Image (tube, grey):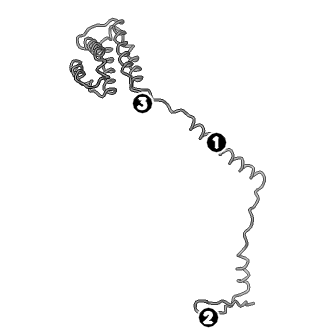
Amino acid sequence: MIVRVRSCCVAAGCTWITLLPAAVLAAAMDDIRDIRGPKALSGAWGASAVLAAVTVAVLCAVYVIWRGHRRPERRPSLSERTLQRLEGTRPLMRPDTARAFGIAASELIRDYIEQRFDVAATRRTTEEFLHVLLQSSNEALARHRGLLGQFLQQCDLVKFAGGSLAAADMESLLQSARCFVLSAGEVPAA
């Protein structure tokens, strides 16, 4: 059976008559279907999907809360690090290692001065450093000149003159270094 379909060509103003087999027309009409609603899942499968989605959402929320409330680790200040390093020199506080103690303590304080006050201290002799300190406009460091001078000269005596220190003298030297670091501590951030 042949079905006639009439089409109009509007732009050209002509009419065509097309002959199509009925089976082709029926197949074309069957291919165009209306939208259907959602298909229901079986009860067990749907419950599992909902449970998995809720579990993922809860885990994400717990992670976000944990990250938000976790305290960032506080990095120790320069003074705190220097005091810790000074305490690390205690094993050298014996008469047979007095020279090593004097070198270590002197280097720690000179490193601290360089980092804290931005003054070159490690490449200068004690006299050169104290002379520059007198001419410096750094008032915070100049206030400690006397304490710093005694400390560095006592360290130089042990390092270069081969002087010996008793345990009490080394403890006094360590305490003067601690006192300097504590009194010259960092300016609090604004």
Which one is closest to the eye, mark 2 or mark 1? 2
Across and down, in percent, residue 40 comes to 76, 59
Q: CA distance from mark 2 to mark 1?
A: 68 Å
Residue that mark 1 sits on: 59
Q: CA distance from mark 1 to mark 3?
A: 38 Å
Kindly identify the residue that appears in the image at 23 percent across and 11 percent down: 161
Q: Which mark is first along the chain, 1 or 2?
A: 2
Across and down, in percent, residue 174 comes to 36, 13
The amino acid sitting under disc 3 is Ala
Q: Which mark is first along the chain, 3 or 2?
A: 2
SS for dot 2: strand
The amino acid sitting under disc 2 is Cys
Q: Quadrant of residue 114?
A: top left
SS for dot 3: loop
Disc ID at residue 189: 3
Residue that mark 2 sits on: 14
Q: Is residue 64 above or below residue 76?
A: below
Return the residue nearer the eye: 84 or 178.
178
